[in-house]
Image: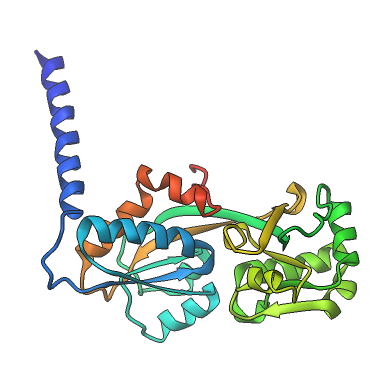
Amino acid sequence: MRVANRLDLVTLRGAVLSLVTAAWLLPLPCAAGPLKVLSAGACGRFVGAMAAEFEKRRGQRVLIEEDTVGRLVQRINQGERFDVALLTPAGIEKTPGRFAAGSRVELARVGLGVAVRQNAPRPDIGSVEAFKRTLRQARSIAYVDPAAGGTSGIYFSRLLDRLGVADSVRPKALLVPGGAVAQRVATGEAEIGIQMTSELVGVKGVALVGPLPAPIQIYTVYAGVIGASTRDPAGARALLDLLASPEAAGPLKGAGLERPEAR
């Protein structure tokens, strides 16, 4: 009897949790205002796909504003109101007191990739030495301006120094302040683009060559948090739960992202 009772209790708890989750996603009265999401550019496509699903289920609009992590940190610290934000852990640490306690959820990780114009020859990036040769031989290279606070641009700029190719690459670099590296490749302004893989896939006129060689690859983790000043904590929580749910696996992969490794 005790075993049966325990099983019944587990089943009951699971049913209650499912009902609570379902309730969060029930359509709301028309008076519910839109949720504002501040998202790092690397997560933009993923958040957009899930926001569309959220709006369909809950009947509540989601307004997404993308920017570099550095700029989002500045905006948040200047008092900009938001409901949900997707930032790096370092970005979150730079905005103390701006998030609801205990709301942080690690959602995605992504590495850097190399892209060229559609139908252009694919450069060799199969090893660190091959990658260095490709950088030296390229006519022009686009990446996010480190001064704009973009995570990929900061890392890649430091990587050039580590690889000893900074002097040959920086004179022909096309620094992109807003993160639209792939667009510069698509238009032919840059022969090669270096950015988070998620920001290079699915862009018309651009082909992803592949990720950086493993020895110099870096993965950036992005976490979701609820704003301390949100006017709709239940709606913000429902959206964050959907982003973290198993249902998000497909859109996550389609956006060039993956779940962070369990710690």
Asked if residue 158 is positioned above or below residue 208 in the image, the reply reads below
Q: How far across and down, in percent of the image, does residue 78 sit?
A: 41, 86
**In the rendered view, does 222 fall on the left or right side of 51?**
right
Q: How many marks?
A: 0
Image quarter of the N terminus:
top left
Pick the residue in front: 106 or 152: 152
**In the rendered view, does 141 fall on the left or right side of 167?**
left
Q: How far across and down, in percent of the image, does residue 67 sit?
A: 50, 75
Pick the residue in front: 151 or 49: 49
**In the rendered view, does 130 fall on the left or right side of 20?**
right
Q: Quadrant of residue 25?
A: bottom left
Q: Residue at x 44, y 53 (%)?
A: 107
Q: Residue at x 66, y 58 (%)?
A: 112
Q: Residue at x 13, y 32 (%)?
A: 12
Coloring basis for residues = rainbow
Taking the view exactly as shown, the residue that stands out farthest to the front is 119
Taking the view exactly as shown, the residue that stands out farthest to the bottom is 78
Asked if residue 14 is positioned above or below residue 191 in the image, the reply reads above
Pick the residue in front: 36 or 147: 36
Pick the residue in front: 19 or 252: 252
Q: How far across and down, in percent of the image, does residue 64 sit?
A: 39, 71
Q: Quadrant of residue 198?
A: bottom right
Q: How far across and down, in percent of the image, does residue 234 sit?
A: 20, 62
**In the rendered view, does 78 fall on the left or right side of 220?**
left
Q: Residue at x 57, y 58 (%)?
A: 202
Q: Quadrant of residue 29?
A: bottom left
